[in-house]
Amino acid sequence: MRREENNGVLYYRFHNLAACGEIVHGVFTRLGGVSRPPYHGLNVGKSVGDDQKAVDANYDLICRTLGIHRGDIATAYQVHSANVAVVGPEDRGQVALQTDALVTNSPGVFLMLRFADCVPIAFYDPIQRAIGLAHAGWKGTLAKAAQKTVEAMMEAYGSRPADLIACIGPSIGLCCYQIGGNVVKLVNEVFPHQPQLLHQQGDGSRHFDLWEANRLQLAALGVHQIEVSGLCTACHNDEFFSHRADNGRTGRFAVVMGLNLGRIEQR
């Protein structure tokens, strides 16, 4: 990923998407915002206990950084599901309920979701000119949120998996993601022939590889272009909000993605 800074706001861009001129996107960190501890920095979570004026100011900072208007953002009330919403111009400024993935082919509509250890997955179809953004923690991963986002793009826009560029963003890594026995059982049920997803530690505990679980889902559909950031939010808690590292009291960082209207009109 490319690490960038604009007026004190630190964010990342995926290499594969940064090379696509018609894509505007940013994986934001916790650095550069105005929220106070324990949400200190660029928190965009409105339901974590932070001051709403600070959250609003952080939204404005993100929009200025990307050169977009806040009213053009479509977002979701995330519930750790695999529900996907197809959004268009009429959804700008709106919140899709009970949803953890958004897809659109409308230039000027910017998708935004919030994260603090769960996996951000961004999609771009350069042929049909459509995008998607998914939020997948362990529940979303086991519910196949990544797969269902691709399937939604196939149905709505005629996307072909082989044409898609998929990017798996910063989230809790195998190094830090210890899970309990009930989740171990579910992982084995959903991925019965993928023992590499669970790594036993010296103390007998198991760690779950969310990145690989989502990559496998995409590869099974025929998605070949998959970029994995390899950034663990718990290890890099100085840059990212991490529910695990912050013991459950923390903010949420933003991932924003949209089709650049001006660049598309020039093509």
Image (cartoon, helix red, strand yellow):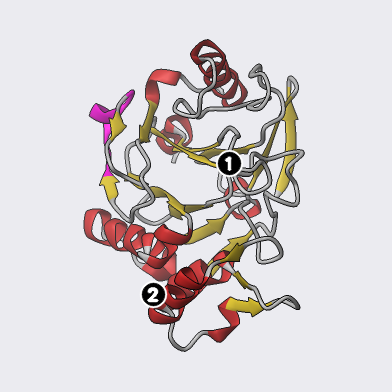
Dots 2, 1 in contact, CB < 8 A = no
Q: Is residue 217 magenta?
A: no
Q: Residue 115's x, y, as percent?
A: 53, 42
- Frontmost residue, 223 versus 168: 168
Horizontal arrangement in the rendering, residue 172 relative to residue 6 (left or right) = left
153 vs 133: above or below: below
Tag shown at residue 256: none
**Label 1 belongs to which residue?**
248
Q: In percent of the image, x 52 and y 21: which residue is there?
A: 59
Residue in the image at 33% along x and 43% along y: 104
Residue type for callout 2: Leu
> Is any part of residue 223 visible from this angle?
no
Cα gap from disc 2 to disc 1, whole angstroms: 34 Å
Callout 2 secondary element: helix
Residue 92 is inside the magenta segment: yes
Residue 221's label in the rendered image is 2
